[in-house]
Amino acid sequence: MAVLMRREAVQGAMARWQSHRWVLADVVPQEPGFGEAPRCLRQTEDEALWLYPGWQLELFSDDAEGYWLNLTSPTPSFFVMWRLQDEHGKESGQGPRAVPQALSLSYHDAGRWLDAQETVENVPASPEVVARLQAFIDAFYVPEVKRRQRPQSFRGLTDRFGQPASVSTADKRRGQGGAVGDRAAVGPQGGEA
């Protein structure tokens, strides 16, 4: 696979703080003419388009659920994690350049990268890639059986030491006279019954 990154001029009020930004332009199948080294395909004052060829797209059976989540989304996509690198921008005099670091079709991978505060963008996958992803999922994805979780109110009680505990709603007496506020039964003669 090959990743295309585009540098474009920022429009509107945001241009006060940042004149240009990098975005993921596309992910395309690798072709022999691309070579192996990154190269600039087009560069103007306001735009630059860079090609990063030679990306291997591997699918792992233990991440079949992540691929399934992507496939069942409204738009199955490629996920690309990229970083700005200053040393590449010095060569062109255009400032830092966006360099892809990872490519995946897994929602789980994209989520982990986002959790790590990385820059992740997505572009729709081609119908051919979606068909191959569907075949992979059909072969390896086994939905996890959802077990009904028992409500908290039906779980057994334990004390702070992990021993079984019980709760009683019966009246408990304090001493012979009973608890404070207990009423004694009075017989017909005025005495206790």
Image: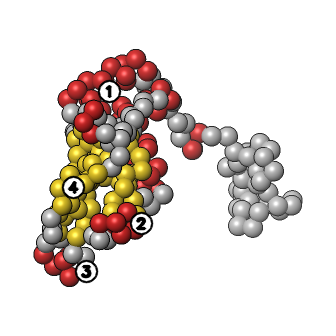
Kindly give the residue lying farthest to the left in the view shown: 12
- Amino acid at circle 4: Leu
Q: Quadrant of residue 183?
A: bottom right
Residue at the spot 36% in from the left edge and 19% down from the top edge: 138
Between discs 3 and 1, the one toward the N terminus: 3
Tag 4 residue:
49
- Amino acid at circle 3: Trp
Mark 2–mark 3 distance (CA, rounded to whole Å) = 22 Å
Residue at the spot 25% in from the left edge and 80% down from the top edge: 17
Res 56 seen here: yes
Q: Quadrant of residue 131?
A: top left
- Amino acid at circle 2: Glu
- Amino acid at circle 1: Leu
Q: Which mark is in front, 1 or 2?
A: 2
Tag 2 residue:
87
Between discs 4 and 3, the one toward the N terminus: 3
Mark 4–mark 3 distance (CA, rounded to whole Å) = 22 Å
Tag 1 residue:
133
Name the spot of residue 144 as percent of width and height, x first. Answer: 47, 27
Tag 3 residue:
17
Mark 1–mark 2 distance (CA, rounded to whole Å) = 36 Å
Q: Which mark is in front, 4 or 3?
A: 4
Q: For the residue labelled by badge 2, is the local secondary structure a helix, a strand or a loop?
A: helix
Q: For the residue labelled by badge 3, is the local secondary structure a helix, a strand or a loop?
A: loop
Residue at the spot 57% in from the left edge and 44% down from the top edge: 152
